[in-house]
Each structure stands twice: as C-alpha cells, then as structure tokens.
Image (cartoon, rainbow, N blue to C red):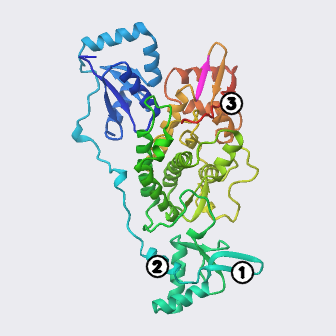
Amino acid sequence: MEIQGRVLVYSILGCPHCMRAKNSLQELGVPYTDVSLEQYPHARHDLQMRTQKRSVPQVFFNGRHIGGNEDLQNLIKDKEAWQAAIEELKSTPPGQDAPPIPDPSTAVKTSDPGDISCELDEYAAFVKELRSSGIIKDHWSGLSRHKNSFSGRAFVDWVVETKQVDRERAVDMGQALIDRFFGHQVKAETTFQDADIYYRLLEDDDTHALNAGPSDCDPRPAGELGEDLRKLILKIYSSYLSADGRKVNYKGIGDSSEFEHYVRLTKELVRVQIAEATRDEKLAFFINVYNALVIHANVTMGPPVNLWQRYKFFNTVKYIIGGQQYSLQDIENGVLRANRRGMGMILKPFGSSDPRLKVALSEPEPLIHFALVCGAKSCPPIKTYSADGITEQLRLAAEAFLDGDDGCQVDMAKKTIKLTQILKWYSVDFGNNKKEVVKWVCEHMGEGDKRSQVNELMSGGKYSVSYMPYDWGINA
C-alpha cells in the first residue's frame, strides 16, 4: 500500500501489545515507522504532551492520535471508519500537527547484551586449588554428616603450609571465601574460625537452583548485573515472541545461542552483592530476575499445567542470589512484599533468623503486581525496569494494565466494576476492603473515560465489585 501520510507507532522492546499493533498494521499492508522509546527516550515527553498517556503502544495516523492497541483494533473492526482513515492516509501528507520522526543521530546507543563479559575474581583460582587440596570430604559431627565439607582448622593448616602465611592471615582468607559467596559455614553462620567447625563451597551444596555452579567473575553491583540480565532476556523474548505477541516459542529460546549465554550470565547472580543495595535497586533487580527466572524455568523444565504443578513451580524454581536460594515465592512475597504471606501460605517466607530478611524491602510495594510476569495469559505484559525512576516505571505499568480490559472492566448500566484476580489475591496490599481497593485502582488509572466512570460509581455509592476469571494458560 502506498500512502502520502505517515503512521507512527511508539513502542518499547518486549511489549506484546506493541507487537500486536505492529503485526496488525503489517497484515493489513499499512506501512509504519516504529519509534522505540528506549532508543529515543526524549520522545516520551512529547508523546505524553500529545496524548496525556504514559503507556505504549501509541499509534498516530498523521496528526490523528488513534490510541493504544485496543483502540487500533476497534478502529480496524469498524470497516467504514477504517476505510475512511486509510483513504485519508493515501491522499493526505503529514501536516505540522503530526508528531515528527526522531533524528537517528539522537538515538541512545545501548550495549549489546551478547557482548557482556566479566572481570575474573582473584579468589576463583584459589578455590580451584582448594578443591584439589584433599581437605574437602564428608565429615561427621556427632550424628550429623556434612557432605563435601572441610573444617576451619584443616583449611588454615593447608593455607599456612601452601601459601607461607601466618594463621591470622589464613583466617582472613577463609573469611573472604564467605564474604565473596564462594562458601559458607554448614550451620549458616557467617564468621570463619580456626576450629573444628565445618564449611562447604557453595557449588557443593545440594541444590536444584537453575543457576547452580561456580562463577569465576568478580562480583558486580546488583543494578549493573540486573540490567544486563534484563537486556538479554528481553532480546530473547522479543526475538521468540509470535507476531501477534501472544505466544512465546520456548523451544526456540532453548535452542538459541542467546539463551546459552543467558544461562552463563545467571551464574553471576550466585555472588552478586545485593544486601546493601538501595530500595530502588532492589525493586528493579528482583522484578527483572523474577521475570527472567520464569522464562528460564519454562524453557528448561516446561510450564506448569495444573494447580499442583503451579504450586510446585512457584515454590521450587530457584536462583542462588548473593549466596542464598530464592524461589519465585521468596522473591515476590519475601523480598518485594516485605515478607508477607502469599496465596496458600501459612507462614511468612522468611523466619526471624533468615539472612534473606536483610535483603527484603522494609515496606511492601503494591505496584510490583503489575510488573511481575508469571507466564500466564492473564499476567501483565513484560516490561523494562531500571533502578533510575523505578517508581514512575511501575506506575506506568499499573496504569497501562488497569486501563486495559485485563485489569478492569466497568459496566455503567449495571453499575458493576470487574477487577483482575490479582487485586483479590493481594487485596491487603491495596486496601482494607473492596471500597479502598477500588479507590486505589481509580487513583492509579490514566486520565480517561474508564477512570471517570469509576469515579462516578464511587461518588454514587451504589455499585458492585467482582473479579474476573484468571487465565492460567501458558503463553507458549
């Protein structure tokens, strides 16, 4: 199709709704220009001024703002209106009111996640020597058997003999192994002692964590590593998402060289320093890691297909992060919800002596529920998160989800508000009762008809609230 006008689609990488909108235009033969807000972040301000919207995609036909993917689909369904819009594009060039195409020279250059490499840790070679020292073996302490362990005293003796240092220096080297997350005391204490107390290398732990294994990389800041993981998994996700954005080719991901590199990169999580990260750094880091872990598990283990498998999936799929194991439940409810009980949980994720409590947020963040992607069809779409401006990014995610039919539906004639099940399962994060939950929803919607309708129903005081069925079908 030849047009004199211009179609612009503002999008971000890995956004299913963006892909659906662009795919629809492709199928209908309508040429368009894709403006990535990751490549052209300065275009976001102009877009918000033009649309009063902060979500993507946003579609323009010349100076006419069509709206998001749902608005575009509604226009396509209205054959008369669609044909009129196409005829206008064919005959009318873009005027001064049309948003401009960004200058390519202003694009932000981003590193290719496939080129990521690491600095080698000097203690990695030392650990390899330790493995061949002969002091690592099974030990008994009373009736307890400590597999693949070594005593602090034997370690100090070996270091003194082979490195020609005094015992005090040898103890410092043992403590460094713990501090750098190469090893730990079998009883989880964090102080290394020159005594008959047993220690084990992290790689010798009995674990099914998907990133188990040694990492020779020097530990990197949590924000930096989390950002590299995010870029790589979004690149993979975008490459193997179906044209309509609804399905993920998990087999294709598993066979790709990008995924092989991603698996290697996750091993750096084992020794990442996360406890001292800021709240914003933890938010971005754990959201990105959660979403990546779901995809990793779906590729290597297959998706859960029933209630029992889902329970097992969220409680047993794990990464080792900063020397500690974290399941999906631990990340969501332990860290991001400040150690609150999740669905079906009798106890809190972390006990009072659990070292992971130092990592957990001090207060729960309700906006994470619109960022975590569990792999089900009713989950929010996967998005981009970084520590810089994380609160605004999460607000955008909530706004986009609640503005869509998957998040909230309003029937003014019946005076009903239907909400996503997410708001029921985690209602304590949004309010003490349905009225407070609806108020929270209204406050986090974008300006528009739906928000006005919810406000009107709340002002009248007579309305009912129900929750929509949740589609657990896997997006595979």
Is 368 left, or right, of 333 in this rendering? left
Instruction: Give residue 346's position: percent from left, percent from top.
Output: 76, 50
Q: For mark 2, give the secondary structure.
A: helix
Camera-side mark, 3 or 1 = 1
Residue at the disc numbered 3: 435
Distance CA(mark 2)–CA(mark 3): 60 Å
Q: For mark 1, give the secondary structure.
A: strand
Range of residues picked out in magenta: 407-411
Give me the residue at 51% from left, 77% from top: 176
Q: Indicate the quadrant containing the C terminus: top left, top right, bottom left or bottom right.
A: top right
Is 247 left, or right, of 25 in this rendering? right
Camera-side mark, 2 or 3 = 2
Classify 10 Å Cα crowding around label 3: few (below 14), some (14-19), many (20 and above).
some
Quick check: is 335 in the magenta stretch? no
Judge whether residue 215 can be spotted in this image: yes
Give me the residue at 55% from left, 74% from top: 178
* Label number found at residue 140: 1
Is 42 left, or right, of 379 in this rendering? left
* Label number found at residue 53: none
Residue type of the residue flagged with mark 2 = Phe
Q: For mark 3, give the secondary structure.
A: helix
Given contact means CB atoms under 8 Å apart, are the residues at marks 3 and 1 in contact?
A: no
Instruction: Give residue 430's position: percent from left, percent from top.
Output: 64, 39
Residue type of the residue flagged with mark 3 = Lys
Which is more toward the observer, 363 or 204?
204
Q: Earlier in the sequence, mark 2 or mark 3?
A: 2
Residue at the disc numbered 2: 126
Q: Earlier in the sequence, mark 3 or mark 1?
A: 1
